[in-house]
Amino acid sequence: MIKNFLLLCLSVLCSTSGIAQNPKSDSVENKYLNYFNLQPETIYTQVNKSKYLKSEELWFKSYIYNTQTQKPYITTSNVYASIYNADGQLVEKKIYYAENGVTHGNFNLKENYEPGIYFLKVSTNWMKNFNDPNYSLQQFEVLGSETDFNSVEKTDQKYDFQLLPEGGHLLENTKNTIGFKARNANGEPLIIKSGKVLDSKKNTISTFESNEFGIGKFSVILSENESYYVEATVDDGSIITEKIAKPEAIGLALSVNTLNQNMLFIIIKTNKKTLPYLLDKPHYLLIHRDGLLKKIDIRFEAETLDYTLAVPKQELYSGMNILTVFNEKDQAILERLVFHKTENLTEDMSLLGKKVGNDSTQIRLKSSKANRLKKTISVSVLPTSTESYSSNNTIISAFLLKPYIKGDIENARAYFTSNDSKTNYNLDLLLLTQGWSRYEWQDIFNKPQIDKYAFEAGFQLQGKVDDENVSDFKEMVLFSPKNEIMLTADVKDSLFSFDRLFLTNDAILSLSAKNKKDKLINPKVYYNLYPTYIVDSINTEKAKKKQIKLVVNNTDFIYDDSFTELDTVMLDVKKYEKKEKFMPTGGVNNRNIDLKTVYSFSTRILEVIGSNGFDIIDRGGENITILARRSPNLQGRLSPEVYLDGVLVSGQLYLIFHLTVSDVEELYIAKTGYGIDGSGGTINIFKKGGGTSKSRLNSNFISNDIKIGFSAPKSYYSPLYNTSKREIFSKLGVLNWISNVEANENGEFVFKVPNYFYESVNLYIEGMSEDGSLISKVESIQLK
């Protein structure tokens, strides 16, 4: 009878790639699909370390992932990075631009950061549409002037010992599987050396022990009218006792066996009291995650109490699989998490070689997957004795485990270090003791996710012309040299809009109106930039807020810019600002035109261009064309490329129509451009003040500083550490942070680490491939 049922289940599962065709509109399947119709983003953020001294910079890189496709979320662009204090109040905020599923940035902890616990939240506007968004929240600490690395906060020796029935229910007169999890008062794993299950007469019914993470399981038949408890002996000899909850008289129990390499065995159990109520009442099992779904019907038969479903592992979804049993009323009654490791999920990283130089060492790493796919990693380089990096949270656990689990995951890195039977067994124990998934079926049934919040892509400028001559306005002109923007937008009913703008938050925006005669006019307009930054808060009640006691002096561990110490090997480094020169764009043999001695201040720039090898054709109304006098090919005379403050304006020459020598700092002309056939040449005009000037572009433009925009990522620089304080440096110092290392044509990652006085360093590596394969590794490198 069981054999026939197995064959039926396999035929149902293997004949569908998802759910049944055309599900009813009010069915569980349809509601499930609707709930996951909006694909959420999941974000993981690696920080260069988790303990900082004031004056240091926090450096980070964020990875954005689509858990349904298990690939980078490449369409994400606007990413919000915010820092909150221990009370959940906003301290600082920035917006960064993400490309191909990654972004990186930094925060200077010098100002507004008193010693204490803080949180870095990285999120998007789209995430607000979801009931349980998967933004990243990284805790870090700003230390005071004195820090004790050896002190351990003393607490009363209390234990947290939890008994967790597999599937969520215990059933009497049935073999039940019960998981357990043991923790000390600090939430750290507690090793159970030996344990036993006892009945009311103190008879030993079963025995057990934990793994190195303080978790395990045992099986026991719980009889009616009997009580049971466990005694567990921890590694210090203490004994913990805990009662086992009274089993249900009527119901179902669930057990899963993942040990077989090719098959997953799902055992659904009942007892004699329950079976009569189950006959002719169809139940079913859903195997699902992130809007992906497979269904297996369950039919109960007389005299059969245990039903084993043998599911080929190749039919499981890659990564997490949630097994949920529903009764005839479409109520979820049992649930279990199962993880299916596949080759596409992760890839390993190994040291290919190193080359030690005088001041730095070149490191070469190689991925375990020999393909030419684009891969990017971030690397934090710290002393091997560091106490400033929390490596528990990894990109793998953030994307493959955390979105489905309600509780915290201790030792997350350990579950993906290998694919052997022990590691996989420990991972399955972790999932058994996590209980039901984060998905709330009441939300799926009654609280659909609606796209109320936009999927942001850049910024939008919306404005209104407040001018009595608005009917004469044909379009608005938007100009921002630093952002290399020159755009036009139609004016309709006094309104105009510029969409998908990629703006930095320290640039100048200039607006002008063009009338029907193509003449620029200084407009009277009102405008707003969207999105604006919404100030919110976070709930830090469940966050772990552990601080190190402050007793050992670390004053002057980091020098400021003016510090001088003659008795150490540290040198006073003076910074000299090098004045940037104008860099012409394009062209061969760019020639600087002498404007000061040859031309008067009132001479129009177009006249200067015309006297240096070009013809100016004026068609009236600022409508002009510039042509090279010589013809480099059979196509006739060509127009040069014209750049204004580094921005190509060849199609908007009205912007230089009114410029005179008094407006221009530098003018470069090249009569020949790049290319086999040559070109019409290039003209580079640099106005006085350039793109960073707060003065108006000209009298026909209005200009304003941008208050909202993307923060520009900075290049990493190391603080000026006082390396004579080696004890503190070994625990808190940072050797390097490389935010973006991409694989070369040979699939190798090559970067350098500075040589200090350490024989070895740790590389904390996180990364992602364009196919979604995840990289997480801690690599120790010997430098001497």
Image (cartoon, grey):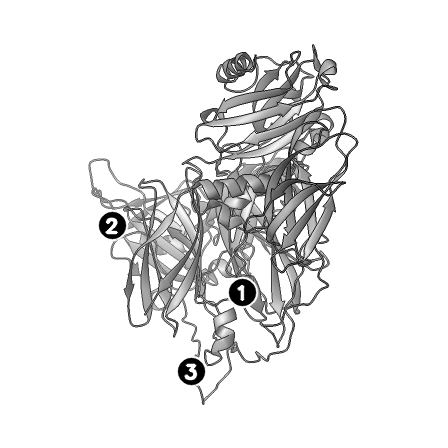
The image shows residue 619 at horizontal and vertical percentages of 41, 40
Amino acid type of the residue that numbered disc 3 sits on in the rendered structure: Leu
Q: Is 679 drawn above or below residue 720 in the view shown? A: above
Tell me which residue sits at (31%, 40%) in the image: 372
10 Å crowding of disc 1: few (<14), some (14-19), many (20+)? many
Q: Nearer the viewer, residue 341 or 123?
A: 341
Residue 571: give its label: 3
Q: Which residue is mark 2?
A: 672
Q: How many marks?
A: 3
Q: Give x and y (percent) for residue 580.
A: 40, 66
Q: CA distance from mark 3 to mark 2?
A: 49 Å
**Can residue 524 be seen in this snapshot?**
no
| Residue reaching furthest to the right | 225
Mark 3 crowdedness (10 Å alpha carbons): few <14, some 14-19, many ≥20: few
In this rendering, which labeled residue sits more in front, label 3 or label 2? 3
> Judging from the image, what secondary structure is the residue with disc 3 in?
loop
| 456 or 210, nearer to the observer | 210
Q: Which residue is mark 1?
A: 388
